[in-house]
Amino acid sequence: MKRQDDVVILYVDDDLGNRVVFEQSFAHRFQIRTAASGAEALEILAKEPIGVVVADQRMPGMPGNELLEHVKRRRPDVIRAVITAYADLDPILRAVNDGLVARYVIKPWSPADIENMLAWAIDAFRVGQEHAEAQLRLLELERLATLGSIQAAILHDISQPLSYMATNVDHLMHLAQSAPSLLSLVKAHGAGLSQMDRENIEELGSDLGSLAADMNRGVVLMRELVQNVQRMLKASRGTSQALTDPLPTLRFALAVCQRLIMHAQADLVVDHPETLPPIGVGSAELGQVLINLLANAAQALQRRGSPGGRLDFVVRETPTTVAFVIRDNGPGMSAEVLRKVGTPFFTTRKDGTGLGISQCRRLIEGAGGTLTLQSLEGVGTVVSFDLPRGGRGV
Ligand SMILES: Nc1ncnc2c1ncn2[C@@H]1O[C@H](COP(=O)(O)OP(=O)(O)O)[C@@H](O)[C@H]1O
Ligand SMILES: [Mg+2]
């Protein structure tokens, strides 16, 4: 493949090993510069013709997203990308909500993924040098791909333990086949065994088969689920206005927010029908809305400061819409805060961006739905939204 030398890529990572690997992997095709910290990166940016900055999120001193904010202010034409684990939810949400970065690369990355991303970033930079407007459209499309790549990373993480569980369950079922003959052996020759040993062996022999079969049904079900979501992701790639089955996206959003909810030590109660009709919004957009609202509720519960926190997530089908309700008994909002929420950049959180609710409102109203917030200080918050079934006018 031809080398692309006129645009320089700056890779920023505090880990020397990562910098060496990055350079060795991509220097044959791109011109790469590396920096060990945000401060060093900003110095290089001021002096050299950098077109793309790729930063690791977790760095001491200046984390990746903070560095990229500086880059955005100083050189808005530079294409920005961050490498992170999907557990770093706040910076990911920030990037998705405010377009801070064009690309989020989820760890563990494959060289092929990064190579494609770098080639794309160089093209995007070149387009931007000629037509700023075309670059904006390109970046908007990329933003939607970000959530898709988190989904793919989570599915990948789930499918690995699932596949060894499947192998083990298979082996267990095989072992269970010899249980009846083992049992008759114990009956015939087990006179020397204690009563307890004999009972234990008999229990093992009689239950093993049905336990293994039960586990097998569970594993088969989970594998089907994972495969369905993977297929759905492939099918929906690039089409943001597709009809979306809300359930897989809902499960995905819960999985992404699981850690935050657990951290808040709150009970999560999820209540939805077994099937739901498709709705007229892209799965990336629905995912963005649900993750923002669930994260807000979990963050509120974290601030509660007393046990008994509870997050209720209820989904219902109406004749024309699918209605979502997310309720928490966190600290709630004062009338003053409630009035300001949804104004871009209004936040009361130290790490907040104040873009969550305003983005949710934009996405929901853009799909023909409505968003309502109710909150009482000291009691809790209820966020409800609905989305039309089958898209607008269908
Ligand atoms: N469930 C909730 N309970 C209490 N306050 C909330 C809740 N959801 C949102 N808020 C308030 O609204 C503000 C704005 O939320 P959001 O737009 O998501 O931005 P961010 O989460 O970055 O602060 C939050 O900082 C918080 O004060
Ligand atoms: Mg938020």
Image (cartoon, helix red, strand yellow):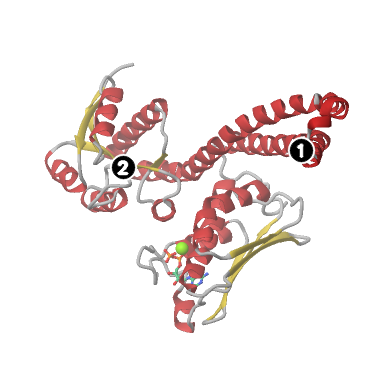
Regarding residue 86, the answer to whether it shows in the image is: yes
| Coordinates of residue 313 in the picture (x, y in percent) | 64, 63
Q: Is residue 93 above or below residue 210?
A: below
User: In terms of depth relative to the viewer, which is nearer, 200 or 384?
Assistant: 200
Quadrant of residue 379 in the image?
Answer: bottom right
Tell me which residue sits at (35%, 67%) in the image.
350
Report helix, strand or loop for mark 1: helix
Tell me which residue sits at (27%, 50%) in the image.
72
Q: Amino acid at mark 2?
A: Asp
User: In terms of depth relative to the viewer, which is nearer, 239 or 181?
Assistant: 181
- Precedes in sequence: disc 1 or disc 2: 2
Residue at the far top: name it: 1
Q: For the residue with label 1, is its CB less than 8 Å from the closest atom of ligand 1?
A: no
| Coordinates of residue 152 in the picture (x, y in percent) | 53, 38
User: In terms of depth relative to the viewer, which is nearer, 315 or 45?
Assistant: 315
Q: Amino acid at mark 1?
A: Asp
Q: Horizontal placement of 320 versus 24: left or right?
A: right
Mark in the foreground, 1 or 2: 1
Residue annotated with mark 1: 197
Q: Horizontal placement of 387 versus 71: left or right?
A: right
Which dot marks residue 168? none
Regarding residue 238, the answer to whether it shows in the image is: no
User: In terms of depth relative to the viewer, which is nearer, 150 or 338?
Assistant: 150
Residue annotated with mark 2: 56
Work out how far the residue at label 1 is from the one at label 2, CA to CA, in angstroms: 57 Å
Residue at the far left: name it: 47
Q: Horizontal placement of 191 versus 336: left or right?
A: right
Report helix, strand or loop for mark 2: strand
| Coordinates of residue 243 in the picture (x, y in percent) | 66, 46
- Tell me, yes or no, whether the two marked residues, 1 and 2, touch with CB atoms within 8 Å: no
Which quarter of the figure is the N terminus placed in?
A: top left
